[in-house]
Amino acid sequence: MRAYHAGSLAVQERVGVRDVADHVGQIIGQGIKPVAAAFLELQPLLVLGAADPTTNRVWASALTGPPGFVRATGPHRISVTGGPPPADPLAPALADARDLPVGTLALDPRTRRRMRVDGRLRSTARGFAIEAERVFANCPKYIQRRRSYETVADRVPAAARHGLELTPAQAEFIAAADTFFLATVHEHGADASHRGGDPGFVRAVSPRELTWPDYPGNAMFLSLGNLLADPRAGLLLLDWTTGTTLQLTGQARTEFGRDGDRQVRFTLDEAVETPDALPLRWSAPEYSPANPHPGR
C-alpha cells in the first residue's frame, strides 16, 4: 500500500510539508517487528476504527482484555481474543467480518507509546484476526501519562444510551476530556488515531457540533487527508476512571486559518454512551508537556 493517497498529499501540499512527509512516511511498513509484537502483548486496551458495512457509519471502538489478548501471530498478522461490548455499534460487523478494512491503535499511557496497525479483519472463533497492511509507531506528543491501571472485575456494562444530539452531561464529559480517538476511512482502508490536549481542547459548540484544534504533528496528515477524501468520522471518548465510553459518528471537515492554524469541525449523526463499558480504572493523568494551553 502506498504511504499516502491523494487526500493526504493535498493537505501536505497546502500546509507546505511534502518533503517532510516523504521523509517521515518511511516509518510506515507492512511487517510487525519483534519489538512491536512485544509492545502489543503488554497492552490491555486496543482502539479500532471502521465503517459499519450495514449503515456506512464510521465508529471508533475500545476493546480490552488481559495483556496478551492482542498479539502478533506472524509478521503480517495480529490476533485479538474477544471483542467490544455487545452494545458497541461495531460489534455485529466484527462478529461476522470476512474482509473488513480497519485501523487499530495500541496506546500505552504508562510509557506514552503508541502503535498503529491498519489492515483487513476477519472474524475467528475466539475473536478476530487482522492482516496488516500498514504498521508504524508515532511519537508521544500530546499523550497524557497515566502511570498505572487496575482491572475492576465486577464492572458490568450498563445499557447503551442512543441519541441524535448531545445531552448537557455529555457536553460536559467532552469538555473535561484530555484524550479522544478518531476513526477515519479512505478508498483503500481505515485508520484510528489519537488526539490529546489539556481539558477544553475539544468542545461541544452545540448539541450536534464539536470542534477541536489540529495541533502540529508528524506532517503525514493521514486523518485530515482521509477526511478530505471522505468526511465520515467516528470519535471515541473514555472516562479513564469509570470506564464509561462516549462514541460519536458523523462527518468532519478541516477549516484552515490564515495564520496557519487548523480547526476540525465535526457534525454529529448519532451518539452512543455506555456507562461502565470498560473494566479498566487508570490513575490520574500527568499532562503532556507538548500540550498547548488554551487561552495563553
Image (cartoon, rainbow, N blue to C red):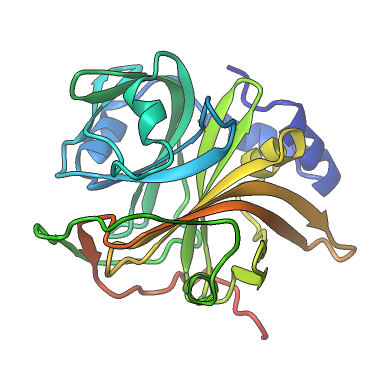
Pick out the residue farthest to the top: 98
The answer to whether 264 is drawn above or below residue 285 in the figure is: above
Placement of the C terminus among the 4 image quadrants: bottom right
Apparent side of residue 267 relative to residue 172 in the rendered image (left or right):
right
| Residue ID at (57%, 51%) | 270
Q: Position of residue 138 (x, y in %)?
A: 47, 45
Q: Position of residue 126 (x, y in %)?
A: 18, 24
The answer to whether 7 is drawn above or below residue 153 in the figure is: above
| Residue ID at (27%, 36%) | 83
Pick out the residue farthest to the bottom: 296
Near-viewer residue (122 or 88): 88
Q: Position of residue 17 (x, y in %)?
A: 76, 43
The answer to whether 203 is drawn above or below residue 247 in the figure is: below
| Residue ID at (59%, 68%) | 202
Say if residue 79 shows up in the picture. Answer: yes
Say if residue 220 shows up in the picture. Answer: no
Apparent side of residue 78 relative to residue 228 in the rendered image (left or right):
left
